[in-house]
Image: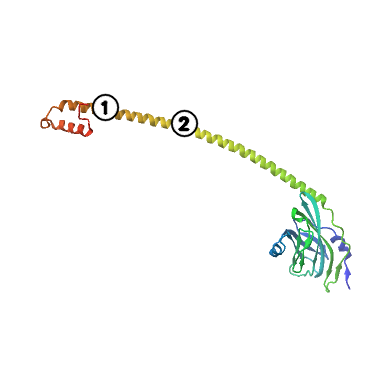
Amino acid sequence: MLRCVGSLLALVALPAVTHGADITIPLNGGAIVISAQVRETTELAYRIIHPESKVYDFVYQIENHTSSRWRIIRLRFDLGGLCDGKPKQWSIPIVVSPLAHSVDFPWVEKGIQPLVSSVEPIKLGQTTSIPLPDLERCSVEIIKAVLSSAESDERDKVTIAGTTPEPLDLTSELIAIQARKDAEAAAQAKTSAAYAAEQAKKDAADEARRKQLAAEQKKKDAEQSARTAMEDARQAARIAEDRRKVRAACAAIYKDTADTKLKDLTVKEEQQVRTCQALGLYSSQ
């Protein structure tokens, strides 16, 4: 004979923890702990067979922290999302059969329910997707779970059943989430603007410094060019003066030796004559 645990029903009929944390539902002196998320499907077959439909996976994991083996557990997940900044809600029924039990560690049941962003469900093998036509432009922000009913195996003979309440209105929570997102976006924009202004100020300072360094370098280059030109002029003047002196010396040597026979020249005079001849300066010019 089955025994109805009515006192537990009042506990499990309430929505549990929101999306982003484990969902804990009290059950039969223990609890079932649920985690869930919505993501784009990883099943390639959907993309090949139904390329016109955007398919998502509602992925859930259920841990049995009770002392019972459950033949069947019926859950309803209430999802709250933001669609272009506006609140939206969906409900997804999930049936888990069975949910086993281990005395050593919690039994974990994993599952996937496909969701499709169209008005008609699509099938892949024995699995039929749940149509949520506006999901593609929405972000799922809240996931809550309600236990509709539970039936244990023949050993425990525990049944929990009753009227499942209507999904809670998540509008206020979603509006608060959107307000927080807007505030974060505004803060980010303000931070970005402040960073841009600071960066512009830094860039302007860097540009001014670059121009200053360029002007200083230009001045140094001009001063170096002036020094180099002055040194070149001095060097040219020294060379010109040396050439003038050589020409004058060779002219004097020419004047003194032009009419003297080579054999009558002294050794020194002969060397001077040959040097001036090599320089092309042994002449009357």
Vertical placement of residue 194 versus 167, above or below: above
Give the foreground label among 1 and 2. Answer: 1
Mark 1: few/some/many CA within 10 Å (<14, 14-19, 20+): few
Residue 189's x, y, as percent? Answer: 69, 43
266, 97: nearer the viewer: 266
Q: Which residue carries the number 2 mark?
A: 219
Report the quarter where the C terminus lies: top left
Q: At 85% across and 69% down in the image, what residue appears?
A: 158
Mark 2: few/some/many CA within 10 Å (<14, 14-19, 20+): few
Amino acid type at circle 2 is Lys
Vertical placement of residue 97 versus 176, above or below: below
Viewer can see residue 106: no
Q: At 79% across and 48% down in the image, what residue appears?
A: 176
Local secondary structure at mark 2: helix
Residue 248's x, y, as percent? Answer: 23, 26
Q: Which residue carries the number 1 mark?
A: 244
In the figure, residue 21 lies in which quadrant? bottom right
154, 240: nearer the viewer: 240
Report the quarter where the N terminus lies: bottom right
